[in-house]
Image (spheres, rainbow, N blue to C red):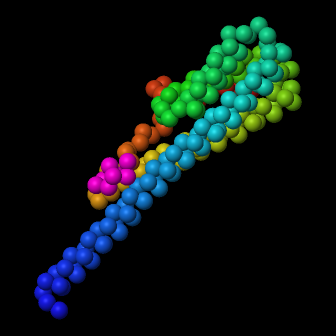
Amino acid sequence: MGTLAIVLIVIAVIVVLLVLFGVYAFNKLRRADIACEESLGGIDVQLTRRADLIPNLVNTVKGYAAHESSVLEAVTQARGQVQAAAKGTDVPAKAAADANLTGALGRLFAVAENYPQLQAAPNFMALQTELSDTENKISFARQYYNDAVSRLNQLVKTIPWMMFAPMAGVKAREFYQAPAGQEQAPTVQF
C-alpha cells in the first residue's frame, strides 16, 4: 500500500466522520426544536382548557350578579383573545392574552366576593377548583416550555451546533414571559 492510498483512506475516514457528525448535529437540533414546539402546544392545551371553563363560570356568576355585565363582558372578550392566541405561534401574543384573561378573572372573582351565596354554590366552587388546577398546569407548561427553549438556545448559540443550525432550519426562540406589569397574579380573596 502506497502513501497515496493511506492518505486517501484517512481522508475518506475523516469525511465519513464529518458526515456522521453533521447528521447527528442536524438531528439533535431538530429534536430540540420539536421539543419547543411540543411544549408550546402544552401551553396552548392548558390555555384552551381554561378558556373552555370560562363560559360555565360566567353563566354561574350571571345568575347571581347579572348587573355586573361589564366584568362578564371583559372575561368573555379575554377568553376570545386567548382562544385566538392559542391558534397562533406568536409567544408574546399568547402571554399577553393569558395575562389579560388572568386579570379579567381576578376582577370576576372580586365581584363574586360580594355574593356569599354564589361563593357557596357547588358549581362555582367546582369551577373555582378547576381553574386553580388549570392555573397550576399553565404555570408548569410555561416552565416546561422555557426549559425547552433554554436547551435549544444553548445549542443554537454554541459551537459546534451553531454551524449546523442554519442547515437544520433552527433558530433561537423567545422565552414565554409575562407582559410588563403582569409579573404577579392578581390578589383575589374568597
Q: Position of residue 81 (x, y in %)?
A: 59, 23
Q: Quadrant of residue 113?
A: top right
Front-lying residue, 101 or 23: 23
Q: Is residue 180 left or right of residue 74?
A: left
Q: Give the residue furthest to the left.
A: 3
Percent across and percent down for residue 15 are 26, 71
- Residue 138 position within the rendered picture, expressed as x and y whole percent measured from the top left: 61, 39
Magenta residue check for 138: no
Q: Which residue does the image show at 14% across and 90% down from the upper left?
A: 2
Please give left or right for residue 93 compared with residue 105 in the image: left
Q: In this view, does 150 lie to the left or right of 68?
A: left
Q: Position of residue 6 (x, y in %)?
A: 18, 85
Majority SS type along the magenta span:
helix
Determine which quarter of the picture holds residue 26: bottom left
Does the image show residue 164?
Answer: yes
Which quadrant: the C terminus? top right
| Above or below, comparing residue 90 to residue 36 in the picture | above
Q: Answer whether residue 104 is visible to the viewer in this image.
A: no
- What is the magenta range? 162-169
How many labels sit on residues? Answer: 0
